[in-house]
Image: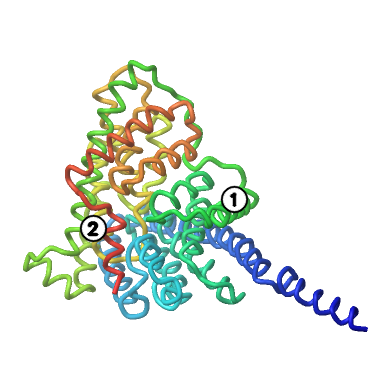
Amino acid sequence: MRRSNLSIRYLRVVLKRHGPEAAVWRRRVAIVGGAILVGLVALAFAHLADRANALFRQLYALWWWAPLVLTPAGFAAVAWLTNRFAPLAKGSGIPQVMAATRNPEAALSSLISARTAVAKFFLTCTGLLMGASVGREGPTVQIAAAIMGRLHKWLHVPLRSSVYIAGGAAGVAAAFNTPLAGVAFAIEELAAAYEQRMTLLVMAAVLIAGMVSLGLAGDYVYFGVMGQTLSVSQALLAAPLAGVVGGLAGGLFSRLLLGAGTTELRSISWLRRRPVLFAAGCGAVVAVLGTFTGLTWGTGYETAKDIITGGEAPSWFAPAKFAATLATAVSGLPGGIFAPSLSIGAGIGDLLREFLPGYPPGAVVLLGMVAYFAGVVRAPLTAVIIISETTASRGLMMPLLAAALVGEFSAQLLCKEKLYHGLSKRFLP
């Protein structure tokens, strides 16, 4: 009898430690379930954002003057809704996730709460419906971190910063259909100190979210396949040139965006205290640029893809898209800068083609994209992997890496502080 009681006790201990209700199993369910949900929500977000962008373009095609009224009013409305109901949904979403890793428990009811995530989802789509120059990738990172954190909380799994990092990385992977970029982004941007214990968590979340996206959306390449390559002699000239030009432009964007939130200029400070009026003014800038160019609305995805595949953009496209994206970003509207930055980079690459006659045009465009993107986000490894995975341009890996490294170095000449790290400070107590 005594031996029987000991066996029953031993069995209970084993079940408690290793059974279906054990902490290790709850953690695995949270990781797998969270990653699947991230993949599904990212696909739904992409579909709704694309529909919103398309509806705005249809409106612009019918009445070219409509955005002059709709966009400023829409910016003001979205800014009011954001400030009134979800002030932590402002901007990209990546700085919020960075700030959330400092205090994971508290962040779940503030920076990445369910309310903030839902508001981010719909307000970003509303911004695209109004013609804002924003992307959905940054918001996907914040939404994905909120999903992962909430699921861990429901299953009574301890919250660590690695949970949010894994969620954000899964969001990048699902948004771009680029699993490797998700891992690189987690290491290079989201995690200031990369913990060994979170390696499995990040890898599992990224791969599962990527597989969900791949299974439902198909094996697509974000910008289409670009098979051009550069010779060694061509790369030795094109990569540094693109790196310097793109990096300086990216550094300028970061400097202006960070400066807009901290400058003591009386006029800017006065407008910052009146966020709805400020957003309306930014919307007017976006409306005028978009109405008279017809190319600066939304994510810029279509224009970037056209440039990569051999089309030509007007010489003013890059500076015009730069101004529209900056005006949208400083307005405080929910929305990211990933896709618009890639579009601006494509425009810079298109300008560089004029100085490099005889060079493969698509390859030069990609060098401009990676250099500008690395200059803005200051994450060269992530930039290279995103460009190579979204264009299937693996034959350009070395020139892309060279341009990204030069771009990051050049950006530091104009902006010492990393953009997302600087923005994340605004969300810290």
- Percent from the top left, x then y, of residue 83? 30, 76
The quarter of the picture where the N terminus appears is bottom right
**Name of the residue lying farthest toward the right:** 1
Residue type at numbered disc 2 = Ala
Which residue is at the front of the view, 212 or 347?
A: 212
In space, the residues marked 1 and 2 are separated at their CA atoms by 35 Å
- Percent from the top left, x then y, of residue 133? 32, 55
At x 47%, y 26%, the residue is 395
Compared to 429, does 235 lie above or below? above
The quarter of the picture where the C terminus appears is bottom left
Which residue is at the front of the view, 42 or 28?
A: 28
Front disc: 1 or 2: 1
At x 33%, y 15%, the residue is 233
Secondary structure of the residue carrying numbered label 1: helix
At x 43%, y 27%, the residue is 396
- Percent from the top left, x then y, of residue 338? 37, 50
- Percent from the top left, x then y, of residue 125? 42, 63
Identify the residue under disc 2.
Answer: 327
Labels 1 and 2: the sequence-earlier one: 1
Which residue is at the front of the view, 188 or 335?
A: 188
Residue 207, label in figure: 1
Residue 189, label in figure: none
Residue type at numbered disc 1 = Leu
Left or right of 162 in this view: 282: left
